[in-house]
């Protein structure tokens, strides 16, 4: 500590002044202080002795006043803790007097104190709390930056409950018994009603926890609790009584506060308390593992990490949303505590204007603080939520890799066909390029599994990212027909490797129980990346004055995925058993209908961006359309389970295919801008809406040992049909235009729906196994 510079000491004193720790610091570190720090803290100690004398006088006058009015009350916190907890009075700074009286007598107590010259602090009537608006004497005092100013007026808070269940959304049963167990003790020369020792500790914990969860904790309160826990760490009898007096939910809230005090000040805890702390929820334990010290540093860096502690203790989603809304989007901000304590009528217009300006400045600082903290809150919340749900650091690294990788690809695929049209190529050649990429995907899936088994997922993943970045770069620069087709085939082959290793890579970063959550989160984030990538691609084309510079940037974005991927250490999958291909009549019927479905969708998907360019949409607007369609896809996928529960699995798929055909029919009219955008959003939403049902249907109608083979055949048919569709549609579009071709695609989609209804939804096609979606809709 002796190595601290004067600047360090000033910052330490600033922190300690706000945390009420200046006087404890003076006692434990006096010999290490520079002379000027020692002199300042000595002056503070002298002034605090004067404040203590005035505080004791205030207790005496208030006790006489309330006693004369026949009001029974308890003195809470403050110097009452000195006798209970053994806290030296010289170390305690007190700015208010907290009293408790039952709700039926609290207003009588307020009226009595008003006779002593106390008045309500204005603006607090609607603030939800556990006490009446603060009472204070108007003395004309103004804040001058001195936390030990002897003229700071003492305020009084009249509590009518010990905990606000409705506001905190955390039950604290047993606090109503505190009043019944009250006792008497001499305080400031007067015998006052106070809480018994065990209840005083409980209330100290609740009081500290309440402020902790609201983001305005005072570390001295944790210091005082820690000192007491250290003193009774070996008093087994004390903790036996503590357990018998307080119900489990009340002990749980105390355990949270006591764990924080232990983390901050390193006190020992009794075995009984260790058991209570160990019984806290797993999400709460994860919060302590990563954010225990964050609330203590909130003075220096705007953070709201205590929000995740609060959410970890709640039991319903409604409570979680209510607390999160209140903390992240507060409708009211705290009042400025540094105003003048003087009656409004005593103020000149100049002073009133000065106070209003200062209050506006304070409000601006608070709003800025809330805004600055939101980014950090999002990051810390993701970390806490992931760790609490068993998502490892390796999963987040792979997710970051996928975000970076797919962001570049979304931008690339948005602009690449438009770039080719700028080079003079028509839809027939674009269809050839799309077909080459699809054929490459078929070819790439064959060796991908062998490569992963032979060289490991991590090496294959790193190589695939590097090769994808290189191929994107070369495709952005190539112009000849032969090179464009060859590069499309290579790109399809390389990207197929990513598709093959993606699922085992995710599975290798989490344990088996967490895999459904991991996959759901992964694909939800990929939808979000698609929204951002498509929107950004449209903007960047204008900002960078052309499509080719953005395509080169996309290659760089893909390459940047190597940085998080380099730190991956995924668990390698076990060698797969030999693939068994099913030969059931159901699979033949399913694949026939599925091929028709992919012919319909594959005849438009590769040309969607060129279609909107044909309608004279700007590149920026095309990016916005694609981004909006990603939102529609996300909504559609989210609604799919409800549709399947209502209509049944096969019938739901048939409806969605028919709706997709309607979207293609709407696109075939080539109507105005808004009509085309709505038709495209409709088309994409229902097309993706059917995907979960199609996969669930296939997996539920084949034997478990045949699922790998069925998936392989499914992809083979899909890629083959898409290849044929891209080649045929490209040639037809060049000769017939979009209207006729999309009308034919719409007819194909309706035929696919009819085939599913006629071939798949037949008797005897009952599920072999209970797939989650199939089981919920059978």
Image: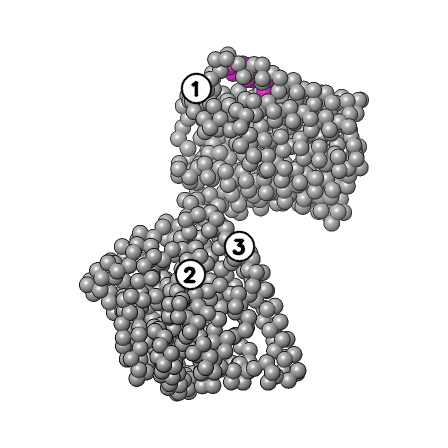
Instruction: Identify the main secondary structure in magenta.
Output: helix
Residue 689 at what x, y percent from top left?
59, 31
SS for callout 3: helix
Residue 171 at what x, y percent from top left?
38, 55
SS for callout 2: loop
Q: Is residue 139 left or right of residue 171?
A: right
Residue plotted at (34% across, 61% down): 175
Kindly indicate whether the residue at mark 1 contacts the one at mark 3 (C-beta within 8 angstroms): no
For residue 650, above or below residue 148: above
Label 2 and label 1: CA atoms lie apart by 54 Å
N-term mark: 2 or 1: 2
Segment tinted magenta in the rendering: 586-596
Label 2 and label 3: CA atoms lie apart by 18 Å
Q: Which of these two is toward me, 347 or 21? A: 347
Q: Report if residue 712 is visible in the image.
A: no
Question: How many numbered marks, from 0 up?
Answer: 3
For residue 650, above or below residue 198: above
Residue position for label 1? 768
Residue plotted at (58% across, 28% down): 690
Residue plotted at (46% across, 43% down): 395
Position of the N terminus by quadrant: bottom left
Residue 108 at what x, y percent from top left?
42, 74
Q: Report if residue 18 is visible in the image.
A: yes
For residue 764, above or below residue 689: above
Q: Residues within 10 Å of mark 1 (few under 14, many from 20)?
A: few
Q: Which of these two is toward me, 220 or 101? A: 101
N-term mark: 3 or 1: 3
N-term mark: 2 or 3: 2
Q: Residues within 10 Å of mark 3 (few under 14, many from 20)?
A: few
Residue position for label 3? 325
Residue position for label 2? 164
Residue 633: image quadrant is top right
């Amino acid at each position: 500590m002796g190595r601290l510079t004067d600047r360090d000491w000033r910052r330490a004193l600033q922190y300690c002044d706000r945390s009420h720790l200046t006087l404890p610091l003076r006692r434990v570190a006096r010999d290490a202080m520079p002379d000027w720090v020692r002199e300042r803290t000595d002056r503070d100690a002298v002034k605090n002795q004067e404040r203590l004398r005035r505080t004791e006088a205030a207790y005496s006058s208030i006790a006489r006043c309330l006693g004369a009015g026949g009001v029974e009350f308890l003195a809470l916190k403050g110097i009452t803790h000195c006798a209970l907890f053994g806290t030296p009075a010289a170390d305690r700074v007190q700015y208010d007097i907290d009293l408790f009286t039952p709700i039926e007598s609290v207003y009588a107590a307020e009226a009595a104190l008003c006779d002593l010259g106390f008045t309500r602090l204005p603006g607090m009537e609607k603030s939800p709390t556990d006490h009446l608006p603060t009472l204070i004497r108007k003395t004309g005092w103004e804040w001058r930056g001195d936390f030990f100013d002897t003229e700071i007026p003492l305020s009084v808070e009249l509590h009518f409950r010990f905990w606000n269940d409705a506001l905190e959304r955390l039950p604290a049963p047993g606090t109503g018994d505190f009043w019944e167990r009250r006792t008497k003790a001499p305080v400031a020369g007067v015998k006052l009603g106070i809480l018994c020792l065990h209840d005083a500790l409980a209330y100290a914990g609740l009081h500290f926890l309440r402020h902790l969860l609201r983001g305005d904790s005072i570390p001295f309160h944790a210091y005082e609790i820690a000192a007491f826990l250290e003193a009774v760490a070996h008093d087994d009898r004390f903790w036996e009584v503590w357990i018998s007096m307080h119900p489990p939910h009340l002990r749980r809230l105390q355990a949270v506060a006591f764990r924080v005090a232990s983390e901050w000040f390193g006190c020992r805890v009794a075995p009984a308390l260790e058991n209570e702390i160990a019984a806290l929820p797993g999400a709460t334990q994860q919060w302590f593992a990563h954010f225990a010290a964050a609330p203590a540093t909130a003075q220096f860096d705007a953070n709201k990490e205590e929000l995740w502690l609060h959410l970890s203790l709640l039991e319903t989603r409604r409570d979680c949303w209510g607390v999160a809304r209140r903390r992240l989007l507060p409708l009211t901000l705290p009042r400025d505590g540094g105003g003048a304590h003087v009656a409004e009528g005593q103020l000149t217009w100049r002073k009133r204007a000065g106070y209003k300006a200062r209050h506006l400045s304070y409000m601006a600082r608070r709003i800025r603080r809330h805004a600055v903290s939101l980014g950090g809150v999002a990051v810390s919340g993701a970390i806490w939520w992931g760790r609490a749900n068993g998502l490892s650091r390796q999963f987040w690294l792979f997710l970051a890799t996928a975000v970076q990788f797919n962001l570049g690809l979304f931008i690339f695929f948005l602009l690449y066909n438009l770039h080719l049209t700028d080079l003079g190529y028509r839809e027939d050649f674009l269809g050839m390029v799309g077909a080459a990429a699809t054929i490459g995907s078929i070819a790439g899936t064959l060796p991908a599994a062998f490569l992963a088994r032979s060289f490991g997922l991590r090496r294959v993943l790193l190589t695939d990212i590097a090769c994808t970045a290189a191929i994107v770069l070369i495709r952005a620069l190539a112009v000849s027909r032969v090179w464009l087709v060859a590069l499309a085939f290579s790109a399809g082959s390389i990207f197929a490797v990513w598709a093959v290793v993606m699922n085992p890579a995710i599975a290798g970063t989490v344990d088996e129980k967490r895999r459904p959550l991991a996959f759901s989160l992964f694909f939800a984030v990929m939808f979000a990346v698609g929204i951002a990538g498509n929107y950004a691609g449209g903007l960047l084309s204008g900002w960078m004055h052309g499509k080719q510079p953005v395509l080169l940037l996309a290659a760089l974005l893909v390459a940047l995925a190597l940085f998080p991927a380099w730190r991956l250490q995924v668990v390698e999958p076990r060698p797969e058993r030999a693939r068994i291909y099913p030969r059931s009549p159901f699979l033949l019927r399913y694949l026939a209908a599925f091929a028709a479905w992919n012919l319909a969708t594959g005849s438009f998907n590769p040309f969607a961006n060129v279609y909107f360019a044909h309608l004279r949409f700007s590149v920026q607007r095309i990016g916005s359309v694609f981004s909006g369609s990603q939102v529609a896809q996300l909504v559609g996928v989210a609604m799919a389970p409800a549709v399947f529960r209502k209509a049944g699995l096969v019938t739901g798929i048939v409806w969605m295919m028919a709706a997709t055909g309607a979207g293609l029919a709407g696109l075939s009219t080539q109507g105005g801008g808004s009509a085309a955008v709505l038709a495209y959003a409709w088309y994409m939403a229902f097309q993706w809406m059917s995907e979960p049902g199609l996969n669930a249907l296939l997996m539920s109608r084949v034997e478990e040992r045949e699922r790998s083979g069925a998936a392989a055949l499914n992809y083979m048919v899909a890629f083959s049909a898409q290849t044929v569709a891209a080649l045929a549609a490209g040639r037809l579009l060049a000769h017939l235009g979009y209207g006729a071709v999309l009308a034919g695609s719409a007819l194909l989609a309706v035929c696919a729906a009819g085939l599913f209804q006629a071939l798949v939804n037949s008797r005897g096609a009952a599920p072999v196994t209970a797939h989650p979606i199939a089981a919920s809709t059978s």
